[in-house]
Each structure stands twice: as structure tokens, then as C-alpha cells.
Image: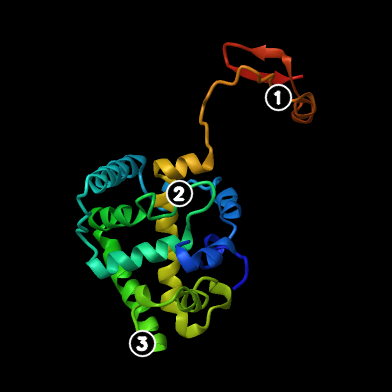
Amino acid sequence: MSNENLMDGASQSRPDGAEETLAKAMNRREAVQLLAVLPFAAALSLPTSELAKARRFVEAAQMAAAEGVSFAPRFFTAAEFRTAGILADMIIPRDERSGSATDAGVPEFMDFMMIERPNNQKWMRAGLAWIDAQSNTRFGKPFADASASQREQILNDVAWPARAPEPMADGVNFFNRFRDLTSSGFWSSRMGVKDLRYIGSTFNPDWNGCPPDALRKLGVTYDKFEPKDLRLTPG
């Protein structure tokens, strides 16, 4: 497997025991740099209010789990929920900076979204069944019970659409949707926001304005700043 990462169509497993070495092959920082500039909510047509509702749902589930109350999926079966978690962690594994997709509650986020947006249920259930069918055919066991290298063999056939074999078309379509939903769930979580190191509109007392070279290129100057309009004017 190459060091291309799953966000652009690679695959990796959750760094747990023997799988840790495999996880190190993936540089998620590159994925973060690419994804940091993408408005996931807009790209996936998820309103901010809906993401906020999902975030509250996930955090409540995580708090309950911390108190010993296991999460009970409303959409996923137990087997599907396990598979979704493994697959999500192959897309966003734990690294030196933050936790994995499951650490951020992405499977719970997905379960919430499947109930909120039932039109997504068909492709999700069919896709998870496709993954299991591939694993059973190739290795005689469900995807969740396969080894890390066996799971990679399956995902390597679907993670790069441009080079995927034609018979893998259904898997490619599923993986693209699943990857996008994983990304949306992770980077809308507290862990994901912290991972991006986004500071929002935090006041910077040391900011000295736009650099002179940039001002000259734009053809504007602070000498003709118009406070009423809060804008610079041509120099």
C-alpha cells in the first residue's frame, strides 16, 4: 500500500496493537491540510443547525458511555455499527495530534444522520453489505473479522475511483459517500475542530494590518481608509 491517504482515496486501519505499524504509513496531516479549507457542511448540504444537533447527540452518547451506558444504535445493527466504526477509523486513524474517527463519535454521528436523513439509509446499508460480501468471498469472513491487510486489499480496489476495476463501481460509490460522511462527522466534532487548530475570530493584538507589498498589489492604501465604510480605497 502506498502512502497516499484515504482522504484522497487511500485506506488504513485503526492503530491498535499489530495494526499500529500500518497506521503510521498514513500521513493524516496532509489530509487535514487539504480538508481544512473545505466547508463540509456546505459540501454535504448539512445545515449548521443540523450539525449542531448531531454534535449534541454525539456528546450526550459519549457522556453516557463514560458512565457505563453503551450506545444503542437506532439505525445500524450491532454488526453494521462495528463495521462502520472500523471503516471510519481506517479513514481517520488516531495519530499523535488527536483521536480517531470513533474517538470523535463518528459512528454515532452517522447513526444520527441516518435517522435524520432516511434517504441515506439505502446506500449505507447496501454499502456495508457490499463490503461484507467482498470480505466473505475473498477471505471467508465478514469485513470486521478480517485482518488489517485483508481489509486494505478490499479498500485498495475502491478508494481511488480513477483506477478502480469496473466490477468495483458499487463499492467506489459507497466508499466516496462514506468517506465524506466520516469527514463531516469528525471535523464538526470538538475533537476535529481542535485538530484543525482553527482559532476563528480571535483578536490578535499584534496584527499590523495587510503587508505593504500586498497593499501595493491591490492598489489600496491605509491613508485613504474610510471608517464609515470599513474599507480601504484606491491609492
Q: Is residue 103 visible?
A: yes
Q: Observer-nearest residue: 80 or 201?
A: 80
Tag of residue 210:
1
Residue at image point 51% right, 31% down: 200
Residue 129: image quadrant is bottom left
Of the two numbered discs 3 and 2 on the same chain, state the one appearing first in sequence.
2
Q: Is residue 200 above or below residue 162?
A: above
Which of the two discs, 1 and 3, sits closer to the camera?
A: 3
Q: Secondary structure at mark 2?
A: helix
Q: Position of residue 162 (x, y in %)?
A: 57, 74
Mark 1 / mark 3, whichever is N-terminal: 3
Residue at the front extreme, as displayed: 17
Q: Amino acid at mark 3?
A: Gly
Q: Nearer the viewer, residue 34 or 122?
A: 34
Residue 40, numbered label: 2
User: Which residue in the protein does label 3 denote?
Assistant: 140
Height in image: 204 above or below 33? above
Q: CA distance from mark 1 to mark 2?
A: 29 Å
Residue positioned 42% across, 76% down in the render? 171
Q: Residues within 10 Å of mark 2 (few under 14, many from 20)?
A: some
Quarter the C terminus occupies: top right
Q: Earlier in the sequence, mark 1 or mark 2?
A: 2
* Mark 1 secondary-structure assignment: loop
Foreground of the two, 48 or 146: 146
Pointer 3 and pointer 2: residues touching (CB < 8 Å)? no
Alpha-carbon span between mark 3 and mark 2: 37 Å
Which quadrant would the N terminus be assigned to in this image? bottom right
